[in-house]
Image (tube, rainbow, N blue to C red):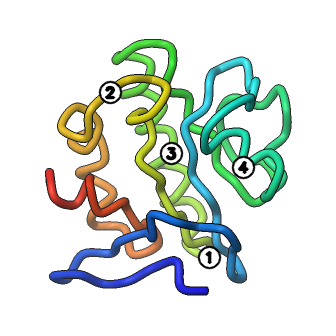
Amino acid sequence: MKNTQIIGGRRVASDNITELGENEIFVFGSNIQGAHGGGAAWFAHKQFGAEWGVGEGLTGRTYALPTMEGEASLKAAVKHFIACAKQHPELTFLVTAVGCGIAGYTPQEVAPLFKEALALENVYLPEVFIEVL
């Protein structure tokens, strides 16, 4: 199992995370209600303990990042996530392509929100975000 790699000096999360290593956190797109019924949210619930009803924040071995409530909400949620990652340097956050599935955003729309995360050694972004940034 290798969920991370360094490409061109950037920390990249695998596109196919099926297991987590010690202190790894699966970051997935959610809705604010925490109804983890599809996509990565369903997988996070079934595989990594994302709690039903928790739409934002740390739960189980995951971080729920609400993506379905509009751009302003998504921007605020990413700021909350970055603050959490700064507060928890002992954890490694593996970000999926949040917002680019059911929520309907493109990597070009979402990736810039994660620009500050590039400086955090414990955050790994999906390659599609790295390509944009």
**How many numbered marks have been drawn onto this rendered protein structure?**
4
Q: CA distance from mark 3 to mark 2?
A: 18 Å
Q: Is residue 78 above or below residue 84?
A: above
- Place of residue 6 in the rendered image (x, y in percent of width and height, measured from the top left): 30, 84
Q: Are marks 2 and 4 in contact (CB under 8 Å)?
A: no
**92 relative position to 18: left or right:** left
Secondary element type, mark 1: loop
- Place of residue 18 in the rendered image (x, y in percent of width and height, measured from the top left): 66, 68
Q: Is residue 96 above or below residue 21?
A: above
Q: CA distance from mark 2 to mark 4?
A: 20 Å
Q: Which mark is residue 90?
A: 1
Residue drawn where x is 84% and y is 40% of the image:
51
* Residue indicated by mark 4: 44
Q: CA distance from mark 3 to mark 4?
A: 16 Å
Residue drawn where x is 69% and y is 54% of the image:
62
* Residue indicated by mark 2: 105
Choose between 80 and 111: the one closer to the eye: 111
> Badge 2 local density, few (<14 within 10 Å), some, or many (20+)?
some
